[in-house]
Amino acid sequence: MTTADISTDVLIVGAGLGGIAAALAAAERGAQVVLTEEHPWIGGQLTSQAVPPDEHAWVEEFGVTARYRALREGIRDVYRRRYPLTEAARKHPDLNPGAGWVSRLCHEPRVAVGVLEEMLAPYRSAGRIRLLERMRPMAAEVDGDRVIGVTLVPAVGDGDGITVSADFVLDATETGELLPLTGTEYVTGFESRAETGEPSAPETAQPENVQALSVCFVVEHVDGDHTIPEPEDYGFWREYAPAAWQGERMLSWVAPNPRTLEMTQRTFDPNPDDDVLAVNADQSKSAGDLELWRFRRIAARSMFAEGFYASDLCLVNWPSIDYFLAPVLDVPREVELERYAAARRLSLSMLYWMQTEAPRSDGGRGFPGLRLRPDVMGTDDGLAQAPYHRESRRIRALTTVTENDVSFAVRGDAGATRYEDSVGVGMYRIDLHPSTGGDTYIDVASTPFEIPLGALIPRRMKNLLAAGKNIGTTHITNGCYRLHPVEWNIGEAAGHLAAYCAASGLDPHAVRADGRHLAAFQAELDDVGVERHWPDGRVHAY
């Protein structure tokens, strides 16, 4: 393998939502950017992981950046211009193509890929952003507390490697892959209560106790028998009854209620004749997960001209596909890949169970008409291109957000902690899925929160920034800072900061420590539509 060298102002490893937002912000400010991506599609959890955007109840009016809002409206615009929507759907101001209950904007992932590519296109044409596709980081060169360069290799197959040297390096990977490569101090799993003071933390640290990952897939329900071959691990998964399921099997319509932990019956009825324009996807009023077909539906056939879709498209991202047998962080690469493969076999096992054994409302069993849609996923096997990682390695940051900063039970009407160095806002429940240590759900009401700049800056490393789920949160608060609009905001702030530092000759620590520079940097964020504080009185919890 030969290695080619590239030099740039800003290197961003990972073109998920945080990475793309960072690249756009840095390039618009004039920096030269190299952006890398391991998977076929850019966009991370929104696209290659196929997860509809998890957003807060006020997303249509406040609480996201202007660029993120442009992404959302760009997705709606594609549907209005290119899809045969009904006239009523086309005129709906808050068009939700899937009429799903999890989000006000459930849509097919490929549409988001196109919009993200369009947002990057001008900067790629101008040479401001260079996208290195299907590359993953393998090694890094470090000089003291500075990253000198990162070596990337092909994500699949053999080929030449590339070493990129940069003034500033942003880790926007899904699992904080640059942190061990660069020697940046980080934490995984549960911190101890003694360290964080969090009421939901354990007495001792549990670094291998990490949230479940999931491999999502899309199904439709059409005529015929589309049953897949019995998956390799089906016998195991068919009988598996984890502790959190209180004696029930995981492959079933029964799962814990995340908020009460009571075992709760879900229903599954393909292609219901519901009023799709009446759906109000507001998780502050209802989680919406009791009827699984509609919960994460990404295309509602009655939203479109009659006959355009043969069936709704249902995105499966349910408790029954949460893989938490073992962690994938800080294990040998071959072990990591085998555990990803095991998670994929779990997802296929759930599909096979649905096709062959699942109880139906009419008293029968099995839905052989369920058919995978590989074309919707952009894969051969019909599963998402990448696993949905809920939890990353997290930097030891200048500021660490804890449960005591955002929990409504702790903060009450005072609202979340306010930060002088705020670079954005977000809102979501503290939502943790079952974990590799055997823990059940932790689902705690939060209050609208801010993103402190100090959470993006490692304590020691001078030119590396966190630009995704790897910021200074804890295992607990990662549960509300990991969602789509927050990840985007984190990346956008990191990209702006890297460009600001490149232009001023300062390091991130110096910008944050100098009141004059911090104010100037925050003013730039204000100018481009980054909302840094919630309106007074916005402390409602859900």
Image (tube, grey):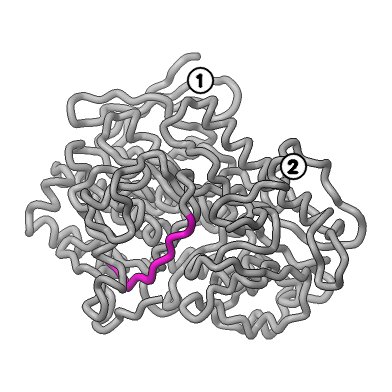
Decide: few, some or many residues near mark 2? Use Cα within 10 Å; few <14, some 14-19, many ≥20.
some
Magenta part, dominant SS: loop
Q: Mark 2 — residue?
A: 234
Residue at image point 59% right, 57% down: 245
Q: Which mark is residue 372?
A: none
- 171 and 166: which one is in front? 171
Residue at image point 29% right, 67% down: 406
Instruction: Determine whether 160 is above or below 342 in the image.
Output: above
How far across and down, in percent of the image, does residue 440 sit?
A: 48, 56
Dot 2: element: helix
Q: Which residues are magenta?
A: 440-449
Residue 116 appears left or right of 264: left
Q: Quadrant of residue 77?
A: bottom right
Q: Mark 1 — residue?
A: 160
The residue type indicated by label 2 comes to: Tyr
- 500 and 462: which one is in front? 462
Q: In which quadrant of the rendered image does the C terminus lie?
A: bottom left
Q: Quadrant of residue 222?
A: bottom right
Report whether residue 193 is seen: yes
The residue type indicated by label 1 comes to: Asp
- 175 and 65: which one is in front? 175
